[in-house]
C-alpha cells in the first residue's frame, strides 16, 4: 500500500503519525520517538504531510521538505472540526490527515530560520515591554501606599527610578524604601534591554530593501515596518495589516491576500502590532464562541 498523505501530531518527544493511501485507506497510526522521526519519513515515498501550525512546526516543516515531502501547515482551528472522538494523539493525527486533504483549505507558509529569528526579537521585546509595565505599576502601587503620587506616563516613573538612589529617603519604612530601590533598578535594566532590542530591530529593518522604501514615508519607523513584515499573518479571522499614505490617500497592505479592502473592517489603529493587540493570554486558552458585527457607515 503506497502512502499518499500523512498527518503528523507534533510533541516534545513522542510524535503520532497517521498515514493513508490514495483511496483513503488507513496505512498506519502509530507513535514515533523524536530521534527516529526523520528516519521514518526517509523510508516513505514523497507524500503530503499535514501538521498544525504550532510550536516547532516550522522547524519540522523545513526538515521534511529537505526529504522531498510536500509539507502543509494549518491553524489548529482548521483541524478541530475533523476530530471524530475524544482528545487523543491518535485522533488528532487522523484529524490532521483528513483536514489537509480538503481542496479549499488555506495553509500557513513555512518560515525560514531567518524569519523566525526576527520574530523572536519582536516577541522578546514585547515580553520585556510587558514586564516593564508590571514593574512600573508595582512602583506606583508602593508609593501610593505611603501617600506618594507620580505624574502619569512612563517618563515620570523612569525619572523617579534614576534619582531614587541619589535623593534622601522617602517618608516610608526602610524596608519599603529598599524594595522600592530593587524595583527601580529592575525598571532601569528593563528599559535598557528594550532599547537594545529596538536597535536590533532597526538594524534588521535597514537591511531589507522593501523596509527602507517604506520607512521613507512619514509615520513609518523600523518597528512598525518590521512588525508588519515579519510575523506570519494567516490566522482564520483577525490578522494584522499595514496602511500607508501614498498619493494623498491611505492604502491597505494585507500580506495574506485573504480579503479585499471593501470587505475589511479596521478594528484598531496603532503604531505597530503591539498597539493594536486586543487579546493577550498568559496561559493556554481555547475560544469557545465568537461573534463579530460590522456595520457599514
Image: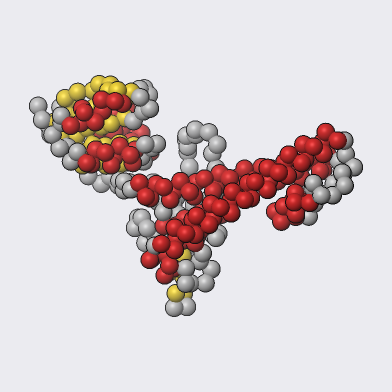
Which residue is rendered at x = 44% and y = 60% of the image? 205
For residue 18, say whether it is visible: yes
- Above or below residue 143? Residue 241 is below
User: Quadrant where the N terminus lies?
Assistant: top left
Residue 106: give x, y in percent of width and height: 30, 47
Tell me which corner region of the image, top left, top right, bottom left or bottom right, holds residue 100: top left
Which residue shows up at 56% across the image and 52% down it? 196
Q: Residue at x 29, y 25 (%)?
A: 35
Which residue sits furthest right?
A: 171
Residue 137 is drawn in which quadrant? top right
The answer to whether 134 is drawn above or below residue 162 in the figure is: above
Residue sitting farthest toward the front: 166
Residue 114, given in percent of the width and then of the height, sits at 37, 50
Between 79 and 55, the one nearer to me in the picture: 55
| Left or right: 101 as drawn, with respect to 136 | left
Q: Residue furthest bottom?
A: 247
Please provide percent x and percent y for residue 147.
87, 44
Q: Nearer the viewer, residue 195 or 294?
A: 195
Amino acid at each position: 500500500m503506497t502512502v499518499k498523505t500523512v498527518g503528523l501530531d507534533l510533541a516534545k518527544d513522542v510524535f503520532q503519525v497517521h498515514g493513508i493511501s490514495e483511496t483513503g485507506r488507513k496505512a498506519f497510526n502509530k507513535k514515533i520517538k523524536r530521534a527516529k522521526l526523520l528516519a521514518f519519513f526517509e523510508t516513505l515515498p514523497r507524500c503530503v504531510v499535514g501538521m498544525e501550525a504550532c510550536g516547532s512546526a516550522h522547524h519540522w516543516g523545513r526538515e521534511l521538505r529537505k526529504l522531498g515531502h510536500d509539507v502543509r501547515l494549518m491553524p489548529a482551528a482548521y483541524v478541530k472540526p475533523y476530530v471524530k472522538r475524544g482528545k487523543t494523539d491518535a485522533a488528532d493525527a487522523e484529524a490532521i490527515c483528513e483536514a489537509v486533504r480538503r481542496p479549499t483549505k488555506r495553509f500557513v507558509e513555512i518560515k525560514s530560520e531567518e524569519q523566525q529569528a526576527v520574530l523572536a526579537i519582536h516577541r522578546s521585546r514585547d515580553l520585556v515591554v510587558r514586564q516593564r509595565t508590571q514593574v512600573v505599576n508595582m512602583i506606583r502601587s508602593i508609593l501610593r501606599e505611603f501617600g506618594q503620587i507620580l505624574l502619569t506616563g512612563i517618563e515620570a516613573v523612569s525619572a523617579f527610578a534614576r534619582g531614587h538612589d541619589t535623593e534622601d529617603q522617602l517618608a516610608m519604612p526602610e524596608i519599603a524604601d529598599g524594595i522600592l530601590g530593587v524595583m527601580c533598578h529592575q525598571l532601569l535594566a528593563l528599559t535598557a534591554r528594550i532599547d537594545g532590542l529596538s536597535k536590533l530591530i532597526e538594524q534588521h529593518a535597514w537591511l531589507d530593501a522593501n523596509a527602507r522604501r517604506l520607512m521613507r514615508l512619514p509615520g513609518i519607523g523600523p518597528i512598525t515596518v518590521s512588525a508588519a513584515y515579519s510575523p506570519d499573518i494567516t490566522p482564520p479571522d483577525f490578522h494584522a495589516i499595514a496602511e500607508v499614505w501614498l498619493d494623498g490617500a491611505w492604502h491597505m497592505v494585507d500580506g495574506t491576500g485573504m480579503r479585499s479592502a471593501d470587505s475589511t473592517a479596521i478594528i484598531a489603529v496603532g503604531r505597530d502590532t503591539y498597539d493594536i493587540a486586543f487579546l493577550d493570554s498568559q496561559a493556554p486558552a481555547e475560544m469557545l464562541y465568537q461573534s463579530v458585527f460590522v456595520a457599514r457607515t
